[in-house]
Image (spheres, rainbow, N blue to C red):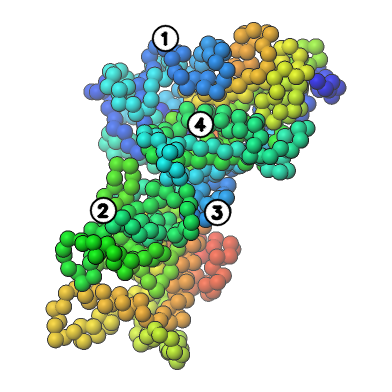
């Protein structure tokens, strides 16, 4: 069974053939399609796609010379198939068949009895779980969502009692742009957010009018995929205290295929911020923001969005939470929602110290390095690159120079 | 028709004007992901929203193809309820004028419009459009240099760009041309014609299919063909020449062209495998360093 694993296939390559329901069956996964194995040649010229671009009077000629290419390539794909398939029903003796009979996933075609075969439709590696065979493309540019995925997105539209969320984190386009895409856009319905104060009630028209006070165009947020509609549209929600607006940090985007699904997408990279000069920034506190009280954990939080958006901010120091509890001690059982909201507020309004900024920038550049060498982005790989860059004494601004990229990502390749 | 003395001499030792044998295709190189996929859909940059790209050169003909989508259809009227709209645009660069024809406006050039239609027909035979209802896949082809056979190069580039974008295809569409003309008193059937040979075969200097008739002799043929080589289906065969030799002559040329498509497919498959394996290895941390972008 493992012989199928990591086998690279191309579109049109036959993965498996089954003669009937009982023998050598398979289930169609992503990146594949099913069609009937051609068995006779009398319907050679039925296919309207044949000679589609050619002059119509020459249709007959094209039919006669079809056999050649088919024979060759079928032999080729049989080699792959025989070695990979453990079932007994996968011999395809129809090498002389020269014509396909119908659409790949046409329901009517599948209802007809006859040997079927599974063909890859994208270029990628084969993955197999029992009978389910799918092909995983090597670097899909478009993110396809699954329920429960963490998304780091950007609000690009408000209206119709829902927010439109760009999954590519691209800024809201000015004017009418035709290239906004449903594949790259999710929808956050008003019923999918927590109302301020955490009250639970039916949304009213006032709430619709006040939607911009929650999220307005251009805001970044984390959310989760609640549902994937039949046409691929993602319905999002933020009905958990972990999700919400993102402020006071850095966004970077990577190809979605580099962020794998994992148990926890809110990760902490430890020991990034050097603590020596934490207090150096304390003197010019003339801005509206509060100044950090110098108590920093030295850690940086990274939110790994599965759509390829990655958010980086400093970790909220534990002291803040304690002090918050201190001030609320008359009602120490204050709802968790309020506490977290206050923490978030404080994080958003507190200036990030220079050393923390450098730490965040270092993590951001580390992620960019990983993207440039096309390495999977995990907390471990980020940490390796950050640590290596610190050990080698690479300055943050030098991290993206090619010679340093190669050097500081070296450890991720030798694993 | 130009009398090519050099060709005559070479044809005695069965070599063509550029030193190839009759059944040899031009040197072909494929570069997948020539442009980095940009996530930014909204901006007006030509590469914005690009989800896959490929640069293909067949001999001196060089073509860049960018695939966008699947994304929303701009206008509701263009939306199809059961499948995706396939939009194909083909353009030339100002520095690749089509031969001796005067430079025309690339957005109104009829030959370009015709060829983008042909390209669309060839591609829609392969793309599983029904998987993306109500959306649009747009394929933009830019001809960077034209030494004959830009339609074939465009089809190959479009296939590779679609594979790079991860759009499901029924099969790879590979294109190659074949031709037949009278050189040095004997008939020659050759594969993958360059501009000079197309001129000899059609008597004109068309970038892709030449103008019909012209000064060509009676049984000269220039035939661009696109096939799905793994199943042996012809998706495009365009012949604008007069066929005095009858259907048999056409069949012979088509056979040769299909062999050429098979060769093209092998080169394309190797390029895709190389890139796919490289990316996979890099992701698993097993490869030597590759730098994307």
Disc 3 marks which residue?
Answer: B44
Instruction: Give whichever of discs 1 and 2 has the lower sequence position.
Output: 1
Q: Label 4: few (<14), some or many (≥20) within 10 Å?
A: many
The percent position of residue A348, horizontal first and vertical second, equals 35, 76
> For the residue labelled by badge 2, is the local secondary structure a helix, a strand or a loop?
strand
Q: Label 3: few (<14), some or many (≥20) within 10 Å?
A: few
Q: CA distance from mark 2 to mark 3?
A: 32 Å
Residue visible at 46% across and 13% down? A45
For disc 2, the chain is A
> For the residue labelled by badge 1, is the local secondary structure a helix, a strand or a loop?
loop
Q: CA distance from mark 4 to mark 2?
A: 35 Å
Circles 4 and 1 on the same chain: no
Q: In the image shown, does A225 or B274 lie closer to the viewer? A: A225
Disc 4 marks which residue?
Answer: B123
Circles 2 and 3 on the same chain: no
> For the residue labelled by badge 4, is the local secondary structure a helix, a strand or a loop?
helix
Which label number is shown at residue A226?
2
Disc 1 marks which residue?
Answer: A42
């Amino acid at each position: 069974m493992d012989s199928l694993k990591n086998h690279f296939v191309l579109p049109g390559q036959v993965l498996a053939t089954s003669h009937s329901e009982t023998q050598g069956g398979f289930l169609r996964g992503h990146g594949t399609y099913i069609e009937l194995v051609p068995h006779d040649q009398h319907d050679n010229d039925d296919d309207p796609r044949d000679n589609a671009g050619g002059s119509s009077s020459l249709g007959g000629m094209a039919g006669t010379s079809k056999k050649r290419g088919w024979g060759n390539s079928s032999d080729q794909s049989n080699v792959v198939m025989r070695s990979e398939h453990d079932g007994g029903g996968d011999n395809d003796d129809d090498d002389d068949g020269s014509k396909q009979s119908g659409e790949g996933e046409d329901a009517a075609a599948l209802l007809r009895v006859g040997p079927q075969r599974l063909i890859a439709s994208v270029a990628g590696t084969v993955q197999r779980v029992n009978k389910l065979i799918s092909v995983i493309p090597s670097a899909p540019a478009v993110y396809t969502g699954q329920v429960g995925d963490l998304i780091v997105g950007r609000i690009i539209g408000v209206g119709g009692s829902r927010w439109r969320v760009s999954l590519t984190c691209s800024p809201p386009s000015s004017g009418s742009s035709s290239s906004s895409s449903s594949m790259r856009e999710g929808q956050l319905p008003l019923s999918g957010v927590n109302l301020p104060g955490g009250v639970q009630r039916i949304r009213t028209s006032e709430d619709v009018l006040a939607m911009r006070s929650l999220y307005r165009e251009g805001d970044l947020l984390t959310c989760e995929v609640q549902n994937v509609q039949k046409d691929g549209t993602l319905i999002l929600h933020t009905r958990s205290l972990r999700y919400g607006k993102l402020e006071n940090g850095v966004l970077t985007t990577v190809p979605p295929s580099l962020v794998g699904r994992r148990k926890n997408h809110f990760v902490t990279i430890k020991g990034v911020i050097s603590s020596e000069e934490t207090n150096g920034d304390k003197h010019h506190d003339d801005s509206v923001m509060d100044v950090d009280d110098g108590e920093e954990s030295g850690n940086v939080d990274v939110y790994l969005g599965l759509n390829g958006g990655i958010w980086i901010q400093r970790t909220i120091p534990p002291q803040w939470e304690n002090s918050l509890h201190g001030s609320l001690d008359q009602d120490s059982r204050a709802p968790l929602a309020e506490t977290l909201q206050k923490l978030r507020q404080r994080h958003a309004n507190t200036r990030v110290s220079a050393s923390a900024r450098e730490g965040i920038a270092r993590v951001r550049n580390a992620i960019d390095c990983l993207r440039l060498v096309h390495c999977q982005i995990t907390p471990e790989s980020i940490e390796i690159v950050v640590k290596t860059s610190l050990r080698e004494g690479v300055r943050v601004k030098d991290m993206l120079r090619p010679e340093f990229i190669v050097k500081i990502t070296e450890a991720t390749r030798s694993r | 028709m130009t009398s090519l003395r050099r060709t005559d001499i070479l044809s005695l030792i069965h070599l063509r004007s550029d030193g190839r044998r009759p059944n040899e295709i031009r040197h072909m190189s494929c570069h997948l992901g020539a442009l980095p996929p940009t996530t930014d859909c909204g901006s007006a940059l030509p590469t914005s929203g690009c989800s896959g790209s490929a640069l293909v050169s067949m001999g001196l003909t060089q073509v860049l193809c960018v695939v966008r989508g699947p994304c929303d259809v701009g206008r509701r009227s263009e939306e199809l309820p059961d499948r995706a709209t396939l939009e194909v645009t083909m353009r030339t660069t100002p520095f690749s004028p089509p031969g001796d024809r005067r430079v025309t406006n690339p957005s109104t050039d009829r030959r370009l419009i015709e060829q983008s239609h042909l390209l669309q027909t060839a591609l829609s035979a392969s793309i599983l459009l029904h998987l993306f209802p109500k959306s649009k896949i747009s394929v933009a082809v830019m001809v960077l240099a034209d030494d004959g056979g830009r339609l074939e190069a465009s089809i190959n580039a479009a296939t590779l760009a679609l594979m790079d974008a991860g759009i499901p295809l029924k099969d790879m569409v590979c294109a190659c041309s074949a031709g037949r003309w009278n050189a040095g008193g004997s008939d020659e059937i050759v594969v993958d014609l360059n501009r000079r040979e197309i001129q000899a075969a059609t008597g004109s200097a068309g970038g892709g299919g030449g103008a019909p008739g012209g000064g060509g002799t009676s049984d000269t043929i220039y035939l661009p063909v696109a096939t799905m080589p793994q199943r042996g289906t012809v998706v495009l065969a365009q012949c604008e020449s007069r066929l005095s030799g009858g259907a048999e002559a056409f069949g012979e040329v088509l056979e040769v062209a299909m062999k050429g498509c098979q060769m093209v497919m092998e080169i394309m498959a190797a390029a895709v495998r190389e890139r796919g394996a490289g990316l996979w290895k890099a992701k698993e941390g097993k490869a030597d360093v590759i730098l994307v972008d």
